[in-house]
């Protein structure tokens, strides 16, 4: 090994020891913000309320999807039997219903996402107060959110995760003892809004 290589490796080891020593002096914790939000009592309540609110629309779209599927099966069973006029009309109905269900599904998803974001913003602001209090009281110098793929955390021990602690602290203090008065709460829903139908309308057969 060359003198340059030995010198470089020795410097790298020394740097690593220095960084490790400095890092050890700082108390770092991790938290899964998304899990914390949906696991608080207010978060669970808000999730249930969102599901109840959007459930009628979901059932309506599911009913429309069942109707569309029945028409598609009817058209397939006709095959070469039946008049071309009847098959063209049925194919046109299928196309119209497919487009309508797609629009309804997209609109429902947009409304659902918008309401979800509202409640996340409300609860997120309050839970940050709890995280700040917990970190300050327990001597943490840094808290990393591991629920985001953007967070540069390669590995973290379970012993530094504060998610459950924050959930307990939030439930124990929310909302009256927080520094900012809380409005009726909300949280991230656990299921998605109705999706648009995946089936496409069969093309009309030319006469």
Image (cartoon, rainbow, N blue to C red):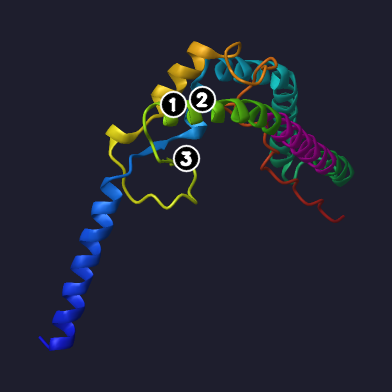
- Image x and y of residue 139, in percent: 37, 33
Q: Main secondary structure of the magenta part?
A: helix
* Label drawn at residue 147: 3
In the picture, the quarter occupied by the C terminus is bottom right
- Image x and y of residue 37, in percent: 54, 26
- Image x and y of residue 189, in percent: 60, 26
Check contact, mark 1 vs mark 2: CB within 8 A: yes
Q: Is residue 140 above or below residue 14?
A: above
Secondary structure of residue under mark 3:
loop
Residue 25, quarter of the rendered image: top left
In the picture, the quarter occupied by the N terminus is bottom left
Q: CA distance from mark 1 to mark 3?
A: 19 Å
- Mark 1 burial class by Cα count in 10 Å: few <14, some 14-19, many 20+: some
Check contact, mark 2 vs mark 3: CB within 8 A: no
- Mark 3 burial class by Cα count in 10 Å: few <14, some 14-19, many 20+: some
Q: Earlier in the sequence, mark 2 or mark 3?
A: 2
Q: CA distance from mark 1 to mark 2?
A: 6 Å
Q: Earlier in the sequence, mark 1 or mark 3?
A: 1
Q: Name the residue that disc number 1 marks.
A: 134
Q: Which residues are magenta?
A: 95-116
Q: Name the residue that disc number 2 marks.
A: 130
């Amino acid at each position: 090994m060359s003198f340059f290589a030995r010198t470089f490796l020795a410097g790298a080891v020394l740097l690593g020891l220095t960084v490790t020593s400095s890092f050890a002096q700082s108390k770092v914790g991790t938290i899964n913000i998304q899990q914390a939000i949906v696991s608080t009592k207010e978060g669970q309540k808000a999730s249930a309320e969102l599901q109840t609110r959007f459930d009628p629309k979901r059932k309506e779209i599911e009913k429309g999807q069942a109707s569309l599927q029945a028409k598609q099966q009817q058209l397939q069973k006709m095959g070469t039997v039946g008049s071309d006029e009847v098959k063209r009309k049925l194919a046109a109905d299928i196309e119209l219903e497919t487009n309508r269900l797609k629009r309804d599904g997209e609109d429902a998803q947009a409304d659902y996402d918008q309401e979800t974001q509202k409640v996340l913003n409300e609860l997120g602001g309050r839970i940050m107060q709890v995280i700040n209090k917990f970190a300050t009281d327990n001597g943490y110098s840094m808290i990393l959110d591991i629920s985001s793929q953007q967070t540069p955390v390669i590995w973290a021990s379970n012993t530094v995760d504060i998610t459950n602690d924050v959930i307990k602290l939030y439930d124990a203090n929310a909302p009256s003892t927080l520094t900012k008065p809380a409005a009726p709460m909300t949280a991230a829903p656990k299921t998605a809004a109705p999706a648009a139908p995946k089936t496409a309308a069969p093309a009309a057969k030319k006469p």
